[in-house]
């Protein structure tokens, strides 16, 4: 393989690893956010407050097992409304932490999207180099041959 081809593939592998690290970081941030949302619910936060703080839909929160309507969280909200429970500080702290994590995820997603754009450009450029196999590009990019084929078809149309 020529030097430009090896450089393209090496850069592609770097971007692949950065995307994988970003995806893992986002998963960790979302897991941490779910913990804070659970704390907020346990302190009497409303579902609307939790949805706003997370930036996610109720349906998604159900799917990832945030306890929106368990007896414990429903009871905590009832106690809060009756005045028997006033954990305003813990609830506010947990909601604020969830908001910070929501914003951090948004920034991370923007960075990841930029890396994906760079990966697409590198895949197209590496695929155009004579002597570079599709398998080498697949391996360096961490994507399937079908994904590359669709990308190349989109860029040539």
Image (cartoon, rainbow, N blue to C red):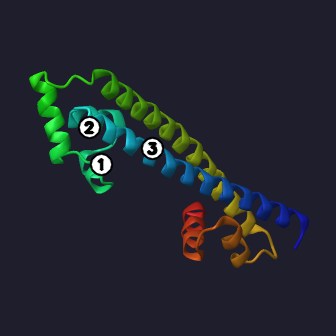
Query: Residue 111's spot in the image, x, y percent?
Result: 59, 42
Quadrant occupied by the N terminus = bottom right
Image position, residue 113 (x, y; %):
56, 48
Residue under numbered circle 2? 41
Q: Quick one: SS at disc 2?
A: helix
Find disc 3 in the rendering and name its residue.
Answer: 32
Q: How many marks?
A: 3
- Which x, y percent locates residue 42? 26, 37
Residue 144, relative to residue 9: is it above or below?
Answer: below
Which image quadrant is residue 34 in? top left
Frontmost residue, 97 versus 85: 85
Element assignment for label 1: loop
Q: Is residue 32 above or below residue 147?
A: above
Write down the quadrant of residue 144 in the picture. Answer: bottom right
Quadrant of the image containing the C terminus: bottom right
Pointer 2: residues within 10 angstroms few (<14), some, or many (20+)?
A: many
Q: Residue at x 20, y 41 (%)?
A: 73
Q: Residue at x 57, y 65 (%)?
A: 151
Mark 1 vs 2, N-terminal side: 2
Q: Badge 3 local density, few (<14 within 10 Å), some, or many (20+)?
A: some
Answer with mark 2 or mark 3, whichever residue precedes in sequence: 3
Occupied quadrant, residue 133: bottom right
In contact (CB < 8 Å): disc 1 and disc 2: yes
- Residue 97 has which mark? none
Residue nearest the viewer, comparing 143 with 17: 17
* Residue 32 x %, y %: 45, 44
Q: Pointer 1: what residue? A: 66
The residues tagged by marks 1 and 2 sit, at their Cα atoms, a distance apart of 9 Å
Circles 2 and 3, Cβ within 8 Å, touching? The answer is no
- Residue sitting at x 79%, y 68%: 129
Q: Is residue 116 above or below residue 104?
A: below
- The residue nearer to you, when weighing 148 against 67, is 67
């Amino acid at each position: 393989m020529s030097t430009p081809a090896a450089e393209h593939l090496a850069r592609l592998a770097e971007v692949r690893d950065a995307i994988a690290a970003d995806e893992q970081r986002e998963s960790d941030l979302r897991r941490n956010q779910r913990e804070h949302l659970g704390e907020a619910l346990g302190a009497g936060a409303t579902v609307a407050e939790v949805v706003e703080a997370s930036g996610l839909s109720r349906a998604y929160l159900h799917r990832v097992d945030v306890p929106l309507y368990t007896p414990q969280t429903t009871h905590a909200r009832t106690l809060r409304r009756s005045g028997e429970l006033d954990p305003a500080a813990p609830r506010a702290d947990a909601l604020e932490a969830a908001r910070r994590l929501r914003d951090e995820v948004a920034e991370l997603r923007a960075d990841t999207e930029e890396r994906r754009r760079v990966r697409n450009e590198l895949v197209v450029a590496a695929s155009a180099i004579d002597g570079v196999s599709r398998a080498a590009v697949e391996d360096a990019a961490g994507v399937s041959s079908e994904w590359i084929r669709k990308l190349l078809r989109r860029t040539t149309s």
